[in-house]
Image: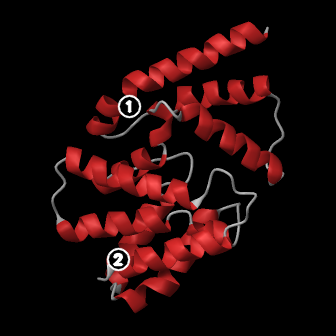
Amino acid sequence: MDFAGARDYILDRLRKELSPTLTYHTVDHTLDMHRAVVRLMDMEQFTDEHERTLIETAAVFHDAGMLHSYKDHEIQSVKIAKKVLPAFRYTEKDIDEISKLILVTKLPQNPNTLPEKILCDADLDSLGRVDFFQESFELQLEWKLNNIRQTTLEEWLRFEVCFFSDHEYFTHSGRELRREQKKKNLAEITDILERLK
């Protein structure tokens, strides 16, 4: 497998072809998720090199479908992966595994295996980080620009409270790494909502 070649190919396409109305699902989000995947694999002491490569590939391709469609973009991401990856020496079995990993990131997430859990935790890593609010408002703007959902500040923050209450990190490392900041972020959202009353 030529992971470096596949990664560079899809990142180049994302940089050149993603719509400027995508303010959250940018190439930076893909790179951020890839970093989170590597960190979680290391923390979970996940050492199978072949499987690590499949997980990393799924990470860099997981939002590639945004090049074609916002709705159900995960399905489009799988189509792109199936079309592109054979040229980078991925086998049919490898691509099937990558496809499953991409599809498990669709909300609501329901991962079963450790690779699936790592990918899901990496995709929503920002919920438990100090840059959460920047990421959150980038998503709100993206939804507005793409006519997904129009929200006031209060409506958006209430949406985030609901999202937080439904979300959990699936890996032990994800919980240990992000639990405390996630609690702080939720408390800050709640505090802002109180002051908006």
Image label count: 2
Of the numbered discs 2 and 1, the one sitting upstream in the chain is 2
In the picture, measured across the screen, residue 57 lies left or right of residue 65, that is: left
Residue annotated with mark 2:
4
The residue depicted at 63 percent of the width and 50 percent of the height is 24
The residue depicted at 68 percent of the width and 52 percent of the height is 23
- Work out which residue is located at the far bottom of the displayed protein and give it: 87
Q: Which of 108/145 is in front?
A: 145
Per the image, label 2 sits on a secondary structure element best described as helix
In the picture, measured across the screen, residue 116 lies left or right of residue 15, that is: left
Residue annotated with mark 1:
178
Residue 99, image quadrant: bottom left
The residue depicted at 35 percent of the width and 76 percent of the height is 4
Q: Which of 165/19 is in front?
A: 19
Examine the rendered structure and indicate whether residue 162 appears above or below residue 39.
above
Q: Which mark is residue 96?
A: none
User: CB atoms at circles 2 and 1 under 8 Å apart?
Assistant: no
Examine the rendered structure and indicate whether residue 191 appears above or below residue 32.
above
Residue 114 makes an appearance in the image:
yes
Q: Where is the N terminus found, in terms of image quarters?
A: bottom left
In the picture, measured across the screen, residue 43 lies left or right of residue 98, that is: left
Q: Amino acid at mark 2?
A: Ala
Q: Where is the C terminus found, in terms of image quarters?
A: top right
Q: Please state which of the two labelled residues, at mark 2 or mark 1, is closer to the viewer.
A: 2
Return the x and y of residue 114 as percentages of the image width and height.
Answer: 28, 51
Residue 5, image quadrant: bottom left
Return the x and y of residue 42 as percentages of the image width and height.
Answer: 21, 50
Q: Amino acid at mark 1?
A: Arg
Residue 76 makes an appearance in the image:
no
Per the image, label 1 sits on a secondary structure element best described as helix
Return the x and y of residue 126 as percentages of the image width and height.
Answer: 49, 39
Tell me the CA gap for discs 2 and 1: 29 Å
